[in-house]
């Protein structure tokens, strides 16, 4: 095939995959992974590592990920580097064909892993050009398709892309949350040791509300000294309080926070009234903001990457963070009892808040992803310390 470009004027010889955007732009490439077609929002991600973690992050439900780093798949796939039981991103777009894995931890290649999880891959695309397209025009709706025969009905794919309603107004947390209450055991992963088993000693108890949570969040809570129970996104106030929590965690997740807030925000408001410590991440940050009367808005292209600098307002320190969100809290809508604590140095958007009259705080980024690598672990330690203080003050 010829040198890739975006978009292609015509189908090149040997093309087995295609990307069709809702505006009619078409880019041809080489398909891998599962065959079929998937429709969603086309975004880009700038991380150089962690493609398994990214693909399995529930926050990517409804999205097709363009990886800006060209060598995706070169370390293969393994069962440890996942953030959920199954991938939630619909597919991936990459520059180079995934190669055979060259890492001692690999259990299978990326192509086989994508096939096994029915996710579509598209290689041979000029991902830098596509990224520039997204940066200038916003994240478009599109369809990624793969057929070993190379036969595609472009009119039907374009109709799919134009018929998809988009993420604004869409509640996806109900689609990715767990269905029942459960407990979490085990801490962070270490080379040569695997995942820490944790201990059964006396620990403050966190009830985590799963709006589309990542496993490593719970691992970091355990590492910081907590015991963790996890409940579905639709858990009621009474169901949460029946577990006798010392504090509440609001997880990350996909979709429009305002849509999820229809059922989540009333519960969060009740939880705030208990005076128990509360900590939110990503979607959880947005839901906390909505619960205290702030607003959220759809971003033009979103923040997705592992190198986002965030400034702590209190001391000016800069954290290198991992981000994955397409909605943001509107700073000007924060009420008097909500103080901004973190600011994105990429575009100045809000990246954290704390309440002045409650032990509650949240951040827009993902501290558990550890790109710093430990720049943000203090947030888990701060939360667990609040849990201990609350447990002591309540006898």
Image: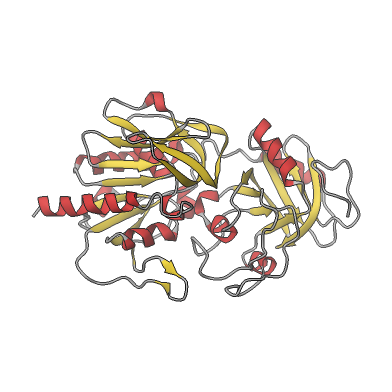
- Please, is residue 358 above or below residue 232 in the view? above
Across and down, in percent, residue 373 comes to 45, 55
12 relative position to 27: left or right: right
The residue lying at 69 percent from left, 58 percent from top is: 71
Quadrant of the rendering where the C terminus is positioned: bottom left
Quadrant of the rendering where the N terminus is positioned: bottom right
Q: In which quarter of the image is residue 317?
A: top left
- Please, is residue 355 above or below residue 185 in the view? above
Query: How many numbered circles are shown?
Result: 0
The residue lying at 39 percent from left, 44 percent from top is: 284
Between residues 71 and 154, which one lies in front from this camera angle?
A: 71
Across and down, in percent, residue 203 comes to 22, 63
Outermost right residue: 13
Q: In which quarter of the image is residue 118?
A: bottom right
- Please, is residue 32 above or below residue 335 in the view? below
Decide if residue 159 is in sight here: no
Between residues 287 and 347, which one lies in front from this camera angle?
A: 347
The residue lying at 85 percent from left, 57 percent from top is: 150
């Amino acid at each position: 095939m010829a040198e890739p470009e975006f978009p292609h004027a015509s189908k090149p010889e040997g093309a087995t995959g295609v990307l069709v955007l809702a505006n009619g732009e078409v880019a041809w490439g080489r398909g891998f992974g599962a065959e079929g077609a998937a429709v969603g929002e086309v975004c880009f991600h700038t991380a150089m590592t962690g493609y398994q973690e990214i693909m399995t992050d529930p926050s990517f439900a409804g999205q097709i990920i363009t990886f800006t780093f060209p060598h995706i798949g070169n370390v293969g796939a393994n069962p440890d580097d996942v953030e959920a039981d199954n991938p939630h991103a619909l597919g991936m777009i990459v520059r180079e064909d995934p190669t055979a894995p060259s890492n001692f931890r690999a259990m299978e290649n990326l192509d086989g892993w994508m096939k096994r999880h029915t996710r579509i891959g598209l290689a041979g695309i000029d991902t830098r050009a596509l990224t520039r397209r997204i940066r200038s025009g916003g994240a478009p709706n599109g369809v990624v398709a793969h057929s070993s025969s190379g036969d595609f009905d472009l009119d039907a794919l374009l109709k799919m892309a134009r018929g998809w309603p988009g993420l604004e107004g869409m509640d996806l947390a109900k689609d990715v949350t767990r269905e029942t209450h459960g407990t979490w055991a085990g801490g962070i992963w270490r080379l040569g040791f695997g995942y820490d088993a944790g201990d059964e000693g006396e620990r403050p108890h966190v009830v985590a509300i799963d709006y589309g949570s990542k496993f490593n969040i719970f691992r970091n809570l355990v590492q910081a000294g907590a015991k963790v129970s996890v409940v579905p996104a639709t858990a009621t106030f009474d169901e949460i309080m029946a577990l006798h929590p010392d504090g509440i965690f609001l997880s990350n997740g996909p979709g429009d926070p305002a849509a999820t807030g229809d059922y989540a925000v009333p519960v969060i408001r009740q939880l705030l009234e208990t005076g128990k410590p509360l900590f939110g991440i990503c979607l959880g940050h947005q839901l906390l903001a909505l619960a205290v009367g702030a607003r959220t808005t759809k971003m033009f292209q979103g923040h997705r990457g592992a190198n986002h600098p965030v400034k702590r307002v209190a001391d000016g320190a800069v954290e290198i963070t991992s981000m994955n969100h397409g909605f943001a809290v509107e700073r000007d809508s924060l009420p008097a009892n909500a103080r901004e604590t973190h600011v994105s140095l990429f575009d100045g958007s809000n990246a954290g808040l704390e309440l002045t009259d409650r032990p509650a705080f949240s951040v827009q980024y993902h501290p558990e992803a550890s790109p710093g690598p430990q720049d943000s672990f203090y947030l888990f330690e701060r939360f667990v310390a609040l849990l201990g203080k609350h447990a002591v003050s309540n006898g």
